Image (cartoon, coloured by chain):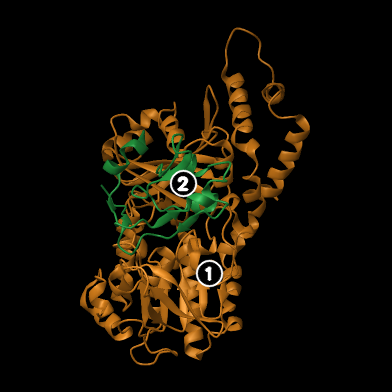
Amino acid sequence: MPLATQKPLANGGRAGDAVDRGATPHGGASVGGGSSAGGFDAIVVGAGPAGTSAALGLAQKGAKVLLLERGEYPGAKNMFGGMMAYCPAPEQLVPGFWERAPWERAVTKRVLSIAGRESSTSLVFQARSGSERSSVGAGSSSDRSLTGFTLFRPIFDRWYAEQAVAAGVTLLTSCRAEGLLMRDGAVRGVRIAGGGGTAGGDDVVEAPLVIACDGALSLLAQEAGLHGGFKPDQVALGVRALYLLTEEDINERFGLAGREGATNEFLGCTEGIRGGGFVYTQTETLSIGLVMHLDSLKQKAIPPYELMERFVASTPVAPLLRGARLVEYSAHLLPEAGVRMTPRLSAAGLLVAGDAAGFCYTNGLTQEGMNMAMTSGLLAAKVGAEALAQGDFTAPRLAGYAKEMKRSFVLRDLRTFRRAIDFLHHDRLFEDYPRVVSALMEDVYRSDGRPRTKIARMGLRAVRGVVPIRQLIADAIRVGRAYLW
Amino acid sequence: MVVDEIFELVSYRIHPEPHIRLNQDVCQGCTHRACTFACPARCYTWSEERARVEFAYEACLECGTCLLLCDRGALDWHYPQGGYGVRFRVA
């Protein structure tokens, strides 16, 4: 049975033709060796932001690209409660990207809340609204680089993959990559489920270049020996609940106008598990959830959905959800260990991008992933196209990708904030310090007829019995080295 | 609790064959049973009666938490076959 008829394609005939030409039934493969007739030049695994960027970038340089996606449609498997930070990469791939992409709200307001037992304290950042300036898109900040975008991945990823298909990429959905095809020590293609999807009898699609964008478990890179499997202390579990509300209610509750959006991160709401909470505004929905380091979750043994239950009922969150209806629940892993988990980024015939390369991080103030995924996809495409032009897919040639990544903001930011990322692996930050901040702020605002002291003394009182002074000083130095100098 | 309503909240196309298999013999020696509380979809439960971890794959959200927390290698872990499993959407 021809491959094209087994696997329904999301995007119509043109793609189907290409698959038909590209792979023949039952283990028969496309013509290997560069861009020979009918063969694919590259196979990209995973139609998320990294994979689609890579596929699009290669197709725009004239390569024949097969983009594999295990979901029924791109975005079907992605959890995203979040915000895509602005970055120039997608505009290089899709002109007018930020005007055309189906985002929900343009985030101009960022709130960081530190939750204690009796109170919470927030820091609010708000960029000057640019709603009245049509040139930057409704709701965007007047300075776009201060703007992030909330979006739904099932909508965004599908739209983005359509741009790739329009550029000539062959998208094959409902297709799980079973593993890599190795020959003479090089990756030469991908094994996919064969004959109607039953076990055994994998089909093979060959191409001289494979780009693994298969997400946070990074199974293909592991198979290729680029890392030994991500560890529980390198990843976090994110759980998200989606609540339906009206656009007006959201604008009112978060103090927003039009399509302006807000994000709110919470520290101290995870009962001692290293992690945090989040609330993100979409047009008429809220994404609410928690992120928890896996090793810490294991140690504290609190089920994520129980923690979630208490988070949505907590003082700062409950009023945001009044009258809202719960409509979806999802979970996903996030790479969180920065450069400590970055695998080798290439092997002969293979490049790795996006979450699969660990390109995702938080330093506690910003959370970034999609921008890094797209940038790494774009750079993988650049190096891939050069390799195709030279017909050289050896390990030394493809190592140029790691060099490109090191020059980009992606690996530079991961390196710059490596101490901050490490600092986020200290338990004290998630229970003790939120309590200290709350105790201090309670003293600042407490009015009980007794004389007040100056803040340093209040601070000492707040710290006493929670964090030893020696520890506090050591942590202060750590914070300084992580964030300040 | 959100996990009690998981089948009302989350859309699945469930394959008749499980995509993850739990090897009970290997699982038996585990002392932390982290999968029983860490799985966000509550796919793993401890059965006092049978003195073992029971696994049901249907509600799996395909996050991989169990794969990373199972340090005994008791899981034969795959993503569901193409087109099957969870399908996130916009309600």
| Location of residue A315 in the rendering, given as x and y in whole percent from the top left corner | 44, 26
- Lateral position of residue A342 relative to residue B67, left or right: right
Residues packed near mark 1 inside 10 Å, few (<14), some (14 to 19) or many (20 plus): few
Which residue carries the number 2 mark? A238
Dot 1: what SS? Answer: helix
Going by the picture, which residue comes out furthest to the bottom?
A36
Three-letter amino acid code of the residue under disc 2? Gly
Front tag of 1 and 2: 1
Instruction: Locate residue A271: give its quadrant.
Output: top right
| Location of residue A65 in the rendering, given as x and y in whole percent from the top left corner | 37, 79
Q: How many marks?
A: 2
| Location of residue A27 in the rendering, given as x and y in whole percent from the top left corner | 36, 82
Residue A88 visible to the viewer: no
Which residue carries the number 1 mark? A223
Going by the picture, which residue comes out furthest to the right?
A470
Q: Nearer the viewer, residue A10 or A471?
A: A10
Which hue is chain A drawn in? Answer: orange
Asked if labels 1 and 2 share a chain, the reply is: yes
- Lateral position of residue B32 relative to residue A246, left or right: right
Any idea which chain is the green one in this picture?
B
- Lateral position of residue A429 relative to residue A93, left or right: right
The residue that appears at 63% across and 32% down in the rendered structure is A433
Say which chain tag 1 marks.
A
User: Which sits earlier in the primary sequence, circle 1 or circle 2?
Assistant: 1
Residues packed near mark 2 inside 10 Å, few (<14), some (14 to 19) or many (20 plus): many
Say which chain tag 2 marks.
A
Q: Nearer the viewer, residue A140 or A200?
A: A200
Measure the alpha-carbon separation of dots 1 and 2.
25 Å
Dot 2: what SS? Answer: strand
Q: Nearer the viewer, residue B24 or A184?
A: B24
